[in-house]
């Protein structure tokens, strides 16, 4: 028994030693852990050691109490502002002094908001900042509309200063709610001042500046939703400025409207270019949307103002063309070769073609405008296979279609083929040159590889315009000979001539589409036949005679036989640019 008790005592001593060693090892391991891991482990221990509290459904009584107390403090701040208002209304101090003291009072609470944000008291800082907004913006409206202390331009400058100070505080202290309150409050104040003063330009410049600030806040702080509503309001108000330019009720002329549109184009597009080119970032959906809005509202509005007033049209045309050439240079010389961001390349080439079209439309009258677009179509079509650029091919198609529309070739050809009982249109040298240019661009761009269905849409559009242009031109040439002119004209013969021209167009499209590089032309054969049949039901049967109907139906029946056979013999080939 003695030996057994001695052995048990020794085992107990050994267990104590092992326990002490384990404790020391645990202490050493905790000391060797990184601070982040030690804090996480300690937090886990604290959570496990903390007593379990009953669930409260997400309602924090402490935060509610804090919010209520801050709300009470905000009401006391507003009470102080109303004291200044009452003293000013009573006439004890001049209006200018009362307004000045009001702005100083708002500035004091702005400083308090900054200190609270620096101390990490974000809720308190937010309530202070909201107090500043509630005091400052209505005070500015009162000072402008009631006391007449500020002109519309001066009010816009003061509003810009208040907004800038508040947004600077919001970005410094990380208060997105403050940025929202300030931006929306400033927007509402600007619109109110524009409505009451009937002076649109100062408020519009403020909104453009605020929209630009929201864009950069999104870049720096990643508060990306804020820029959408501010930019939309700025777009709408700049559009209103363009529409109201020269209106007697606004007391503003077209020069001021052109200034607003120029500033809008410069600051927004300059910001987007800085981010995508200098900072090397990928273009985002907001930049695409706002660029389209800037081009439509800024450039389009400038065109509207320039045409109505007769001033600045040539200047804006030159600037637009220069911007377009610069955008092309940036896209092909910088983005494509060095940056290699596909979205940015498409963005800048799209901007380029819009600027070039707008600029040439402002600078050149018809038919020089359409001839210029036709020349651009041939030039880009000539370069596209050498550069193997599908973008240049698509732009050549756009310029070619624009030339056909601007010169009247497309519209007059459609009228000659489908409308009226007589053809009064006669082709001119300009429309003939445009038709030749469209044909040349379609032939030159056919060798450019097309890797998907979307890239085949521009060739389809060019082929369709070319087919309509050729058929309409043929009808315009032959109509006086076949159907006669004036009261002696023969509507039945004209209807048959149109049918023969459309049938020939369908057969030619099917035949040209047999070649792999002109496959898109073959897509038009069956739609043309369908329209021809509908046209025969509506026109040929109504105006035709037995002799003309025999020819029309014979030609149409022959086409119904030939087109399917031609299309059936077309060899199945891959999309040009892919291995067969």
Image (tube, rainbow, N blue to C red):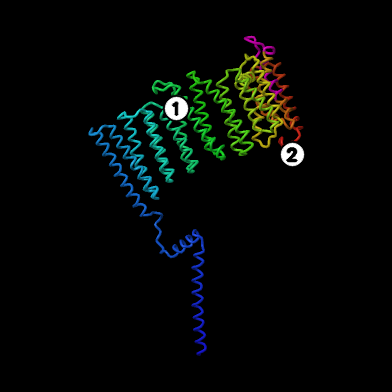
Element on which disc 2 rests: loop
Residue 453 horizontal/vertical position (percent): 66, 36
Q: Is residue 268 magenta?
A: no
The residue drawn where x is 36% and y is 54% is 62
Residue 268 horizontal/vertical position (percent): 50, 33
Residue 36 horizontal/vertical position (percent): 49, 58
Viewer can see residue 422? no
Which label was assigned to residue 240? 1
Viewer can see residue 509? yes
The residue drawn where x is 74% and y is 32% is 516
Q: Magenta: predominant secondary structure element?
A: helix
Residue occupied by mark 2: 579
Q: Is residue 441 left or right of residue 261?
A: right
Element on which disc 1 rests: helix
The answer to which image quadrant residue 361 occupies is top right
Q: Quadrant of the C terminus?
A: top right
Q: Residue furthest bottom?
A: 1
Mark 1 burial class by Cα count in 10 Å: few <14, some 14-19, many 20+: some
Residue 333 horizontal/vertical position (percent): 63, 33
Q: Is residue 276 left or right of residue 437?
A: left
Q: Is residue 550 left or right of residue 21?
A: right
Image: 416 above or below 291: above
Task: Tell me which segment is drawn in magenta.
Answer: 480-505
Mark 2 burial class by Cα count in 10 Å: few <14, some 14-19, many 20+: few
Which label was assigned to residue 427? none
Image: 271 above or below 534: below
């Amino acid at each position: 028994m003695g030996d057994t008790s001695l052995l048990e005592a020794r085992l107990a001593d050994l267990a104590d030693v092992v326990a002490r060693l384990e404790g020391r090892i645990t202490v050493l391991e905790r000391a060797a852990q990184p601070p982040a891991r030690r804090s996480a482990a300690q937090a886990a221990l604290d959570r496990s050691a903390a007593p379990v509290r009953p669930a409260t459904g997400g309602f924090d009584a402490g935060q509610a109490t804090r919010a209520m107390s801050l709300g009470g403090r905000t009401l006391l701040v507003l009470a102080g502002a109303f004291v200044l208002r009452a003293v000013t209304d009573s006439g004890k101090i001049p209006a200018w002094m009362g307004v000045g003291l009001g702005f100083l009072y708002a500035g004091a609470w702005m400083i308090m908001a900054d200190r609270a944000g620096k101390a990490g008291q974000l809720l308190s800082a937010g309530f202070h900042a909201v107090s500043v907004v509630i005091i400052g913006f209505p005070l500015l409206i009162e000072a402008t509309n009631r006391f007449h202390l500020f002109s519309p331009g001066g009010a816009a400058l003061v509003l810009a200063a208040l907004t800038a100070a508040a947004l600077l505080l919001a970005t410094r202290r990380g208060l997105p709610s403050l940025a929202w309150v300030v931006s929306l409050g400033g927007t509402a104040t600007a619109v109110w001042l524009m409505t009451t003063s009937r002076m649109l330009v100062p408020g519009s410049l403020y909104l453009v500046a605020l929209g630009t600030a929201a864009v950069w806040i999104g870049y720096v702080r990643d508060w990306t939703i804020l820029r959408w509503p501010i930019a939309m309001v700025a777009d709408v108000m700049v559009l209103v400025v363009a529409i109201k330019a020269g209106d007697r009720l606004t007391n503003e002329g077209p020069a001021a409207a052109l200034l607003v549109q120029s500033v809008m184009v410069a600051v927004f597009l300059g910001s987007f270019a800085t981010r995508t080119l200098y900072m090397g970032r990928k273009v985002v959906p907001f930049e695409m949307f706002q660029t389209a809005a800037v081009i439509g509202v800024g450039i389009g509005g400038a065109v509207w103002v320039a045409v109505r007033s007769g001033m600045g049209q040539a200047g804006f045309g030159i600037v637009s063309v220069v911007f377009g050439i610069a955008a092309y240079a940036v896209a092909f010389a910088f983005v494509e070769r060095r940056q290699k961001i596909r979205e940015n390349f498409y963005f800048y080439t799209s901007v380029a073609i819009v600027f070039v079209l707008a600029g040439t439309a402002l600078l050149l009258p018809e038919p020089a405008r359409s001839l210029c677009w036709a020349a651009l179509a041939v030039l880009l079509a000539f370069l596209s296979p050498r550069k193997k650029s599908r973008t240049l091919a698509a732009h050549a198609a756009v310029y070619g279609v624009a030339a056909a529309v601007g010169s009247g070739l497309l519209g007059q050809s459609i009228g000659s083929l489908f409308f009226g009982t007589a053809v009064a249109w006669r082709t001119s040298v300009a429309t003939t040159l445009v038709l030749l240019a469209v044909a040349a661009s379609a032939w030159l761009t056919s060798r450019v590889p097309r890797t998907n269905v979307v890239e085949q849409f521009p060739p389809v559009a060019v082929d369709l315009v070319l087919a309509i242009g050729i058929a309409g031109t043929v009808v315009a040439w032959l109509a006086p000979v076949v159907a006669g002119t004036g009261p002696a004209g023969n509507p039945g013969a004209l209807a048959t001539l149109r049918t023969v021209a459309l049938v020939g167009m369908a057969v030619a499209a099917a035949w040209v589409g047999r070649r792999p590089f002109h496959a898109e032309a073959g897509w038009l054969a069956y739609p043309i036949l369908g329209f021809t049949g509908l046209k025969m039901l509506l026109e040929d049967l109504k105006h035709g005679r037995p002799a003309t109907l025999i020819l029309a139906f014979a030609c149409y029946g022959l086409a119904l036989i030939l087109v399917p056979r031609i299309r059936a013999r077309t060899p199945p080939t891959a999309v040009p640019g892919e291995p067969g």
